[in-house]
Image: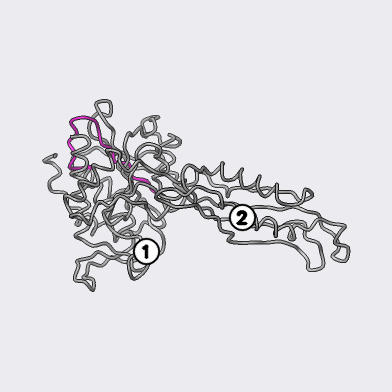
Amino acid sequence: MSDATEAFDPVAFLEAAVPIESQESSDEMREFLVDTLADHGTEPWVDNAGNVRATKGNPDAGPHVVFNTHIDTVPPHVSFERTTDDAGHDVIRGRGSCDAKGPLAALLAGFLAADPVDGAVTLAVTPDEETLSTGADALVRGRGADHPDGPVDPVDGDLFVVGEPTDCDVCVAARGRFEGTLTLSGSAAHAAEPDSGVNAVAALQDALGVIDSFDDDADAHPMLGGPTLVPTGVTGGEATNQVPAQATVTLDRRSVPPETAEGFRSSLERAVRDAVDDAVGVEFALTERPTPFLEAFDTDPDHDLVTAVSDAARSVGGDADGEVRPFGAATEASYFSPAPTVVFGPGHLADDVGAVAHSTREYVRVDRVRDAADTMRRAVETLVG
């Protein structure tokens, strides 16, 4: 463990980070993170995609562990407050306290404490996980991730820890999320002569039947269960006395491994094509975005990475910590898979009262921040010495 990092206090860092508004721009939070890293003896740099990056050790000498999380938050900003909850716990409230500045504080503690003997540890923090994940896309594909002094290779990690609120459990799988629009095309005609046209709205009946039964034969994932497919919007028709020439259905897909976005798109389009009248045109298009969708991921629960983080969590917080389970939301972890990847951090997506992350009551317990920080210190020592 590096002597230069003994003074790093993850709670003090979080108290300073939560008041920084980072829902519209990550610039101020990025500058604070860079200054923190520099103050603790590292040499951080910011790539052209806005990722903050720093590495300790030699990636060619052993496993390369990558710590990743994000510095952006969802709107609106919620002011910082340090207070006591109804159970008497010391808590930090405010936007980003658990998603994901609390997890960032824990990862920072692990990174700054690392003194790799065999391998390396890299901190790679992205600026826009809550929107388009251009930072994570640049990390893994190299697009837009150049160093100010010239091109750099993508982050070539062997093991990834992604900071999100898991209440110090070790999450090894998560669903993906895709979105798209199914368009049915017919031909317009006077409603008094319906057989002279092709009614796209009427074809919705068969299409919705396909959507409803699409996953009837799907295999359930051992941790995530089955996928879901939900119609979330519909449009069709231009005049009340006209056979409609077009109908559209917006679909929300929550996927499980090994399904990919393109695999889902093509299989759904084919299934609807087989079900509706030949005269009806069928197209299913995924919503356009500049970066890949967050796909489902899973990691072998028995992998050494999982064991290292889980054992460390239990050694710090007791048997209630370190449970190996799935994560409840889509995450940038999918960008790093199929490399072994776990999601870990203090805080909850939701508690017994209701939503925590992304809500006006967002908070994290101070003792859980310290537990998560100690877990990361112990885990990184196990993994790279």
Residue that label 1 marks? 77
> How far apart are the alpha carbons under marks 2 and 1?
38 Å
Specify the quadrant that holds the N terminus. top left
Frontmost residue, 97 versus 377: 377
For residue 117: magenta?
A: yes
Under circle 2, the secondary element is helix
How far from the left and from the top, in percent, is residue 355? 37, 66
Q: Residues within 10 Å of mark 2 (few under 14, many from 20)?
A: some
How far from the left and from the top, in percent, is residue 264? 56, 45
> Left or right of 49: which side holds 251?
right
How far from the left and from the top, in percent, is residue 273? 70, 47
First to last magenta residue range: 111-128
**Relative vertical location of residue 357 with respect to residue 310 in this rendering, above or below:** below
Front disc: 2 or 1:
2
> Left or right of 68: which side holds 194?
right
For residue 158: magenta?
A: no
Residue at point 31%, 43% (across, down): 161
Model colouring: one colour
Residue that label 2 marks? 211
> Left or right of 177: which side holds 189?
right
How far from the left and from the top, in percent, is residue 226? 48, 52
Q: Residues within 10 Å of mark 1 (few under 14, many from 20)?
A: some
Under circle 1, the secondary element is loop
